[in-house]
Structures are given as structure tokens and as C-alpha cells.
Image (cartoon, rainbow, N blue to C red):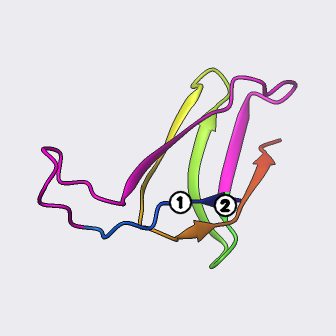
Amino acid sequence: MLINRRCSPCVDNTTTDKIGGRRIVTIDLSGLSSFNNWKLYNLENNNLEKTFDKNNHEINLGNFLPGEGKLYKLVPVE
């Protein structure tokens, strides 16, 4: 489960990056063993988010709004 615990507004005109409370989420899955290919499912709607090779360590999950949370399931591809 990933949660953006930041509570500032989405648009922040005082910062140079204008990102505000949004966060760009990237996860590092370098500790995966055994299977080479994996699938990452968003359990809210059971959609396949990403299919990746275990050698591709960093997976970009995109923007998370303030207070937004998502539950994921990691499944090996046989």
C-alpha cells in the first residue's frame, strides 16, 4: 500500500516546480528473486499497472495527490 501523506494543496504557486502536495512515486524492487518477470496490479479496480523484468529496478507509478492511497498486488509471471 502506498499513501501520499502530504496534505498541502495540489497547486502551489509559491514553489518553482509547481508540484505542491503531489508526489511522483517511484519504487525500487531490486530485492526480487526467483522469477524474472512480474506484474503489478492496482487492487482498486484490478487493473494491470505494469509488467516488468526484475532487472528493471525502478518502477514509476506516476503522480499521487495529497491524501491519495493505492493498494497494489505483486504477482510473478510463470
Quarter of the image with the C terminus in it: top right
Q: Is residue 35 magenta?
A: yes
Establish if 44 lies above or below 6: below
Q: Could you say which disc has been placed on residue 4 in the image?
A: 1
Query: Residue 22: x, y in percent?
Result: 36, 59
Q: Could you say which disc has been placed on residue 71 in the image?
A: none
Q: Which residues are magenta?
A: 11-40
Q: Residue furthest front?
A: 14
The number of discs equals: 2
Q: Give the structural element (helix, strand or loop) at label 1.
A: loop
Q: Residues within 10 Å of mark 2 (few under 14, many from 20)?
A: some
First-in-chain label (1 vs 2): 1
Look at 12% across and 44% down and name the residue there: 16
Three-letter amino acid code of the residue under disc 2 = Tyr
Name the main secondary structure of what is drawn in magenta. loop
Establish if 34 lies above or below 12: above
**Within the image, what quadrant is residue 27 found in?**
top right
Q: Nearer the viewer, residue 29 or 16?
A: 16
Look at 76% across and 50% down and name the residue there: 74
Query: Residue 71: x, y in percent?
Result: 69, 65
Is there a contact, CB below 8 Å, between mark 1 and mark 2? no
Q: Could you say which disc has been placed on residue 41 in the image?
A: 2
Query: Position of 63 compared to 54: left or right?
Result: left
Q: Nearer the viewer, residue 28 or 23?
A: 23
Query: Residue 62: x, y in percent?
Result: 41, 53
Q: Give the structural element (helix, strand or loop) at label 2.
A: strand
Quarter of the image with the N terminus in it: bottom right
Look at 31% across and 70% down and name the residue there: 9
Query: Position of 71 compared to 34: left or right?
Result: left
Q: Nearer the viewer, residue 43 or 65?
A: 65
Three-letter amino acid code of the residue under disc 1 = Asn
